[in-house]
């Protein structure tokens, strides 16, 4: 169960920093994390280390992402456990597994996947 929780945290981190040059956290990333090599959650860890100093807009973005990840987890956690147990988290592999098993997803997870697809087109 811990691995699943870690998966969702990494998903949140990816969404927060996926457009490093854009968005509410761009200035904070440049200010606090410019020397950090992206990858393996390093940017998210950097933001976490500086969470008290982040701009209000960035803090709001992080909270919004956490909310979306929580909703996604609620909708898809059982599907991940059922369909993707042998998949190593990281690098988008769990999401790829869910996409490959679209026809077997629960209606709730499938709806959340469709919503996410619309957000990231």
Image (spheres, grey):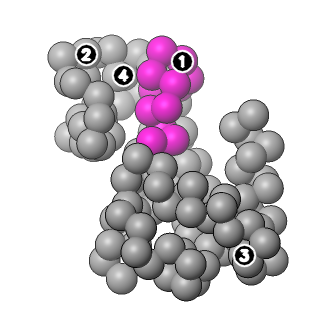
**Marks 1 and 3, how far apart in space?**
33 Å
Sequence-first tag of 2 and 1: 1
- The mark closer to the camera, 4 or 3, is 3
Label 2 and label 1: CA atoms lie apart by: 14 Å
Q: Are marks 4 and 3 in contact (CB under 8 Å)?
A: no
Which of 50/102 is in front? 102
Q: CA distance from mark 2 to mark 3?
A: 39 Å
* Residue named by callout 1: 22
Q: Secondary structure at mark 1?
A: loop
Horizontal side of residue 108 vs 47, given as left or right = right
Q: Is residue 83 above or below residue 18?
A: below
Q: Earlier in the sequence, mark 4 or mark 2?
A: 4
- Which residue does the numbered mark 4 point to in the structure image? 28
| Circle 2 Cα neighbour tier, 10 Å, few/some/many (<14 / 14–19 / ≥20) | few
Residue numbers of the magenta segment: 14-25
Which residue is the site of mark 2?
A: 34
Badge 4 local density, few (<14 within 10 Å), some, or many (20+)?
many
- Could you tell which of marks 1 and 4 lies nearer the N-terminus? 1
**Which image quarter is the C terminus in?**
top right
Secondary structure of the residue carrying tag 3 is loop
Residue at 35% in and 22% down:
29
Tell me if 75 is positioned left or right of 50 in this view.
right
The residue nearer to you, when weighing 53 against 5, is 5
Q: Which residue is mark 3?
A: 105
Q: Earlier in the sequence, mark 1 or mark 3?
A: 1
Verify whether residue 18 appears in magenta: yes
Camera sees residue 52: no
* Mark nearer the N terminus (4 vs 3): 4
- Residue at 49%, 32% in the rendered image: 18
């Amino acid at each position: 169960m811990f691995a699943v929780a870690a998966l969702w945290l990494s998903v949140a981190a990816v969404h927060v920093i996926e457009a490093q040059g854009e968005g509410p956290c761009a200035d904070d990333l440049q200010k606090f994390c410019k020397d950090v090599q992206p990858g393996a959650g390093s940017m998210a860890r950097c933001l976490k280390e500086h969470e008290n100093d982040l701009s209000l807009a960035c803090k709001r973005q992080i909270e919004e992402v956490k909310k979306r990840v929580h909703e996604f987890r609620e909708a898809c956690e059982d599907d991940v456990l059922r369909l993707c147990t042998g998949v190593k988290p990281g690098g988008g592999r769990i999401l790829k597994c869910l996409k490959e098993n679209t026809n077997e997803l629960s209606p709730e997870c499938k709806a959340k996947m469709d919503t996410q697809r619309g957000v990231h087109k």
